[in-house]
C-alpha cells in the first residue's frame, strides 16, 4: 500500500472539519485558509486551489458557511467565508466524532505497542 494514498484519504476525510475550524473564530478568504492549513500542520497537509475552492463552494451550498465579497483599497477583491449557525453545529459534531475516532485508534495502537 502506498503511504501517500493513506494521507490523501485522511485529508479528504478531514478537509471539511479543518476548514470549518479555521473560520470558526473569524471570517477568512480561501488563500488564507490554505496557508493556515499548511503552516499549522507543519507542511503535512496542503490544499491547492483546484481542491480547496470546490470544497468551499460545496460547504456554502450546504449552508455551513457563507461567503461575502470584500474589496479593499489597493487589493484585489476576495471572498471571505464565515461559519453559519448550522456550520457551528456540524463542526461541533465532527470534532466530537474525530476525537472519539482518534481516541479509539490510540487505544488500539497503544495496546499493541505495550
Image (spheres, rainbow, N blue to C red):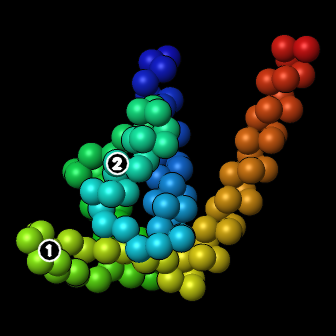
Q: Residues within 10 Å of mark 2 (few under 14, many from 20)?
A: some
Viewer can see residue 51? yes
Which is more toward the observer, 41 or 47? 41
Label 1 packing within 10 angstroms: few (<14), some (14-19), many (20+): few
Residue 102, image x, y percentages: 73, 41
Q: Which residue is at 31% across, 66% downward?
A: 29
- Quadrant of the snapshot with the C terminus: top right
Q: Residue at x 48, y 20 (%)?
A: 3
Of 41 and 89, which appears nearest the observer? Answer: 41
Q: At 49% across and 38% down in the image, what residue appears?
A: 41
Quick check: 103 above or below 55? above
User: In the image, what residue occupies the spot 17% across and 78% down?
Assistant: 72
Question: Residue 66: image x %, image y %?
Answer: 39, 81
Q: In the rendered view, would you say 17 is above or below 87?
A: above
Alpha carbon separation for disc pair 2 and 1: 18 Å
Describe residue 27's horizontal placement relative to residue 32 as left or right.
right
Residue 16 seen by the camera: no
Q: Position of residue 88 (x, y in %)?
A: 60, 76
The residue tagged with tag 1: helix, strand or loop? loop
Q: Is residue 75 left or right of residue 1?
A: left
| 88 sits left or right of 64 in the view | right
Earlier-in-chain disc, 2 versus 1: 2
Q: Which mark is residue 77?
A: 1
Q: Residue furthest front?
A: 73
Q: Which mark is residue 103?
A: none
In which image quadrant can residue 55 be found?
bottom left
Q: x%, y% of residue 9?
A: 48, 38
User: To which residue does mark 2 refer?
Assistant: 35
**Circle 2 — which element?**
helix
Amino acid at each position: 500500500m502506498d503511504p501517500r494514498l493513506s494521507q490523501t484519504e485522511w485529508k479528504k476525510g478531514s478537509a471539511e472539519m479543518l476548514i470549518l475550524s479555521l473560520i470558526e473564530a473569524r471570517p477568512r478568504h480561501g488563500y488564507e485558509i490554505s496557508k493556515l492549513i499548511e503552516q499549522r500542520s507543519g507542511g503535512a497537509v496542503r490544499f491547492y486551489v483546484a481542491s480547496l475552492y470546490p470544497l468551499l463552494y460545496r460547504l456554502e451550498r450546504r449552508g455551513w458557511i457563507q461567503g461575502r465579497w470584500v474589496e479593499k483599497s489597493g487589493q484585489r477583491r476576495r471572498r471571505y467565508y464565515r461559519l453559519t449557525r448550522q456550520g457551528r453545529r456540524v463542526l461541533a459534531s465532527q470534532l466530537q466524532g474525530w476525537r472519539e475516532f482518534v481516541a479509539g485508534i490510540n487505544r488500539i495502537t497503544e495496546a499493541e505497542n505495550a
